[in-house]
Image (spheres, grey):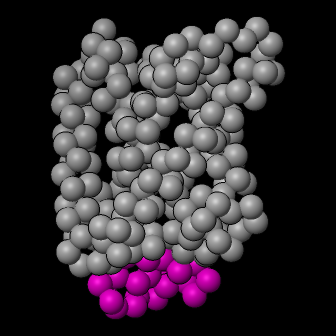
Amino acid sequence: MVSKMTQLMMVIVIVSFLGFITENIWTAFRFGTMDNRGMIMPGLLGYGIAMVLVYFILGTPDAPMFFGISVRIENRILKRIYYVTMAAIFVSIGEILLGNFVEKMCHIEWWNYESLPMHIGKYTSVLTSLGFGLLISVFMDQLFPVLLGMTGYIKRKSTIQMMYFCLIGYVVDFFHEAKYMIHKKEINKRWTIDLHEKCLITNKQVHSFRLKV
């Protein structure tokens, strides 16, 4: 059995990769594009760290907490309602802080929800926060315990070392891209796939390709 710290580290790596995939699925459906999300590596460190923070702050839907303090709710439905609501608030606060911080430091409007109904400023909205809150609740109920349990039984040193290597890579990538955004005042888009035009845009050159359907 590996240590709890190592388990959480591996969960951060896995969730960071899943966050990268999830964001590209979202942009594919909403905008018809997929891209590197401003990173070099296929991973968004913020997602991994955020889910671990949620685990320590809110617990899981079956054992909800409030900043690490157990919340006694007997009714299963009320537990879910509490968890989704708190997760939505968590997301809203995080989006507002991050969006405004990036705008102040980098002069970049990273995203904008003003075209959506029930938006609260540019960087959050009731509908998106509830949607993310629901996804977080499902993830923390169905996947997080599985990932935490699964990583606890990894014994191969090579696998653990690879996970540490990925985590270090994600951290370095995160700070590299943050530095790029602060200095260049733009998101570092290295490649974009336009699903409507069926083309790959990379390094300011367009390369056509066919999508398999």
**How many numbered marks appear?**
0
User: Is residue 178 in the magenta section?
Assistant: no
149 relative position to 116: left or right: left
Q: Residue at x 39, y 74 (%)?
A: 108
The rendered magenta stretch, by its main secondary structure, is classed as: strand
Residue 126 against residue 208 in the figure, above or below: above
User: Is residue 195 in the magenta section?
Assistant: yes
Q: Is residue 82 something that shows in the picture?
A: yes
Q: In the rendered view of the protein, which quadrant contains the C terminus?
A: bottom right
91 relative position to 161: left or right: right
Residue 150 percent location from the top left of the image? 44, 20
8 relative position to 63: left or right: left
Q: Nearer the viewer, residue 6 or 91?
A: 91
Residue 64 percent location from the top left of the image? 61, 18
Residue 55 against residue 69 in the figure, above or below: below
Q: Residue at x 39, y 47 (%)?
A: 46
Task: Report the magenta residues as a range.
Answer: 190-209
